[in-house]
Image (cartoon, coloured by chain):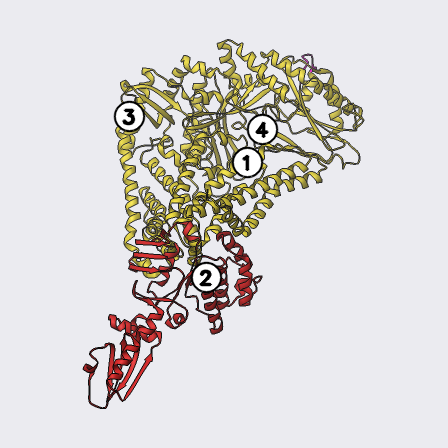
Chain colours: A red, B yellow
Amino acid sequence: MIQAENVTMKFDDFVALNHLNCSIPDGCVYGLVGSNGAGKSTFLRLISGVYRPAEGNIEVDGQKVYENPDVKKQIVYVPDELYFLPQSSMNRMAKLYAAVYENFSFERFTHLTQTFGLNPHVNINTFSKGMKRQAATILALAAQPRYLYFDETFDGLDPVMRNLVKNVIYNDVVERKATAIISSHSLRELEDTCDQLALLHKGGIIFESDIQNLKTSLFKVQVAFSDAYGKERFSGFEMLDYSQKGSVATFIARGDRDAFREKLEDMRPLLLDILPLSLEEVFLYEMEALGYAFKDVL
Amino acid sequence: MKTIFDRKLYLVGLKKIKLVGIICGIILIVCNALVPVASLAASMMNGGNDSTTLTASNYAVANPLLLLLVPMFFFSMFSFLNHRNESDFYHSIPFKRTCILGSFTAAIFTWVFGILLASLLLNGLLFAVDPAMHFSPLVPLQLFAFFAFVSLYVGAFALLAMTLTGTTVSNCAVSLILFFFVRVIAAITIKMLESLVPILDVSYSPLRFLSARYWLPAAAFRPYYDLSVFRDVGLWVYSAVVLIALYALSVWCFCRRKSESAGKSASNRILQHAFRCAFTLPLALLTVFGIMEGAGAAFAVVMILLTLMVYYLYELITVKKIRQTLLSTPLLLVPALCCALIVGGCYFVRGAVLEQNYAADQIESVRFYRHRDFWGIFDRTYTYELTKTDGISVSDPEANEIIANALDDNIHRVQTDDFNRYRPDYNDYYVEIQLKSGRKIRRQLSILQTDVNRVANLREASDAYREVFLQLPSDEEIDSVTFGDRDILTSESSQNKDIRDLWNTFVDEYGELSDEEKLAYKNQYATYSYTYFEGDGLTAELYFNVSGTLYDSYGSSPFETRYFIPSEFERTRSLYAEYTQSARDEVRQVIQNFIDGKYDALFDGSDKSVTTIFNFDGNGLWNRTPVYPRGYYENEYYRSSGINVTRYNGTASAAPAPDILVTTAQNDPEAGKEFFRALLPYLTDTPEENSYLYFWFLVLDDDGMDSHYNTIFGLSGNMPDELKSALNGEWYPSEIGVLSMTDILSQMRNGILKNYGDIYDPDTLLYGFTCTLSDGTEISFESFVPQNGDSVAELDRCSQIAEVISNLLMPYGTAGCLPCEKMTMTYYVPEISGCLTSDADDVWSFFPLTDDVTEKFDELDVHYTLPG
């Protein structure tokens, strides 16, 4: 379990993380969403032990990460800007990883390179950007750590490879009960991968939730009545957004969907539609509810 | 162990710098191999006739390249600190930072030491292959130890620079700053101090630890032939302290370094300011110093502009932001303030030093001491006697009075800006003043020479001085005793033991002398080496050349003395005669063979045919009219050990008909035979009339191996005048013929002979100069000052003439000189009188030969020749 308490990180005068609190359970795929400069990479570097927090504590399995090899050997961090030894092949990199991470499996490495169709003997410099990302992902997964951190890891991947990477990560988490943290500035990238999502903005997590819960907790309601009515008719409901055009009212509601439908049907509407929201829409309304303009956050 | 070292990480490190390692390895190995390969090639071309003893200074000559190569390793290994992605990777891996640093540093030094070792071994193999070289396995071991330490030392600077910076440019710049900054600032500060307080001897101040003497990288360029560098305790202690401090600081910085520093010129802004200011400060300080010295407005403007340019360029190049560069302007005050602080400090020191004026009754004792060259790599080498008596002070009211007056006079002159080192009759001396209060001060004072001589006489009269002066160097103090070209301590020659016996016999005999006899001996026969007296003209005399090192709390003092073996040392001479008996027989045989035309004499009694060559010499003349076989020539050089070795490059085996070409002054082989024929009957085993002929000769066998012999014959007292005349006229273009050195000296002292070719009297002091006109015409003033008797008066006269001429010539400088109207002047002042010293100085300059100069020459009875 990864626990961040009141973590602050500064770069000169710039506050990258500001009293951030976060708890990431084991065995999940955790998504970090935020615009550029929100603090995603900084957070990942902090929980990788690359940075020492200016304030607060970061613990993995109850132990501090920074300068703690026992913890760090359970962590592989795949940064946004990848690092490969100069003029090296994947095989050469695999040897480096094997020297550094004691659980590194050449068997798994071979399997993954075959799965991705990468030639491990070829100089990585000849790889495309996407192939390099795949290579880095393969190396990280072959190291078989308990914690995998991916920073903008889907960048440069085509849709097919993106799905493949997602599947591989997902399977790894499931099979080995590992924990993966994936950062992205695009919500859609994480929508179908993560178990939990956190939204970072200006150095703090402004929203964090279980993704399934997120998707089911908000829904869109379209309803029409034959008589004249207004917003007050729905005063018993928790609404995030309301609009009405003539007899048709549209609003975003929070709560139990079935109970909601039952109550609305009791009002004998002419029309009743309860529609699911995309994750992005959920975020949009949740942000607005928290007082953030979503477009400013993502 | 995982805290500081991990085997797997170490292997990763080894691979990481593989390319750099291979390139550096090739560079070092190839460069180091050049000397032995060239030597081998030369040896093969000459039929293997070269004979040179391998010494440290011609072994692995390219090793100082490590000063550049070692930082390359660090730059390469820790380059990840310059790139964010690499930095993040290495900071995220499951190792403590100390472990990363330790493992990678170990990998670096594995490469460095491996390359060094490989290079040294290969060098050794190449030398070993060369039959002309004598290989000493001790040399590579010593060199390995030395350069391994140098590598560790240099690496510490590079590592610290890497931990403080985050770009390649700043890596290099800060490495340079760390490496040179303190030294450069100290150098300029000391120059300032010397200018502001000329009577202060800075070389004994705490600043001495910043001198080149205590700078290990400089030692890498020192000829470590005598390996004295290993015994320089101060150097090693200082270097070890610096090394440990640098590595400790590097570890501290590395562990606290933020990964995000990668790509930034410095790990924080304060350091960036510090580096920029440090980079600028030397120039700023030079500017201030120049202005203080009255360099003029143009200099000031140029230097200020240069300083500003360096200041801004550093910032611009390292941060690459114009705005930030301009914003750094206010911090220009920092170097300015530093300059002000340093100058202020120098003035403070000046004030403090000038306040220290003591009356005679406050002084306990005074001592003249030898100056340690503060910035030079070498101290001058003095005789053992001079070095040993350096610590003898004079505790005498008269001496105290002289020094107190001199101190007062010097202080007054400095205070009134009237200080002049070049006053007639005055010389500079370094004086240690022991005060009754227990305090000790050292000053460089300009003192009237006659006063100095009075103090010197007082000192020489003291029992303490005499006791020390009469000592011979002990085994612990001696690094090397050579006899001829044989080094007792290091030679692998079979004669090694013989020469040691010879030295021990000499020491025993010396010990049996009375104090008066010892004093007489020391005054007459313990001399300065040829280092200071041109012309190795003493080969007819038997002598030991003894060099060694004395150590005190301020460092090492090398010495070198030539101890002649006069006829009074009968046991030593007869032992030598015994040792050289076989050589004398061989020489006789050689001469006879030569006369008989048996050029292929079976010289050593074996079946091998040999070619014999020998060189006839005598009277202490290093005569260049030897008897050589055809095709041979000699190449005299000074081996790094300071030993004079004659090297033979011959083609004996290639010569189809071994022949001896007699080259006389007249180039007449028959005359040579005639001479030898006449000479042979008068060669005696024991010298008569104290006259000698010195022979050395070389025997080459079929394998190209040579044997080098030397021996000395006495000349029979009944040698006919005709032969003496022949020797005089035919063989030696000299005026004195067959004279012993004693005779030569006697003539010199009696004024009969003032200047004799290249021979300089070992018992006298050369004082004078030589002027060479631009067309080659020489003007010389030379005088030999006996060490005994009227030495003081003679010295005074010489000093006076030299000073007057020197002052006369100085103002002319170089301006407006035309060819044939100017001359070069070498003004050479060697040691004075065996107890007090003034620095030897070669002053080369160009002067117009004007009427007032020539008039002064005439007035002073200085001989000169005008061009044309």
Q: CA distance from mark 2 to mark 1?
A: 44 Å
Q: Which mark is residue B143?
A: 1
At 50% from the left and 31% from the top, the residue drawn is: B230
Q: Which mark is residue B643?
A: 4
Which amino acid type corresponds to the residue marked 1 in the rendered image?
A: Leu
Q: Which mark is residue A82?
A: 2
Front residue (pair B86, A240): A240
User: Which mark sits nearer the N-terminus, 3 or 4?
Assistant: 3
Q: CA distance from mark 1 to mark 4?
A: 21 Å
User: In the rendering, at what x and y percent does residue B224 appear?
Assistant: 53, 33
Element under disc 1: helix
Which amino acid type corresponds to the residue marked 3 in the rendered image?
A: Asp
User: Which mark sits nearer the N-terminus, 1 or 4?
Assistant: 1
Local crowd size for mark 3, using a 10 Å CA cut-off: few (<14), some (14–19), many (≥20)? some
Q: Which residue is mark 3?
A: B408
Front residue (pair B519, B167): B167
Element under disc 4: loop
**Residue B568 position by quadrant:** top right
In the displayed structure, B174 sits above or below B712; it is below
In the displayed structure, B457 sits above or below B46; it is above
Q: Which mark is residue A11?
A: none
Which amino acid type corresponds to the residue marked 4 in the rendered image?
A: Ile
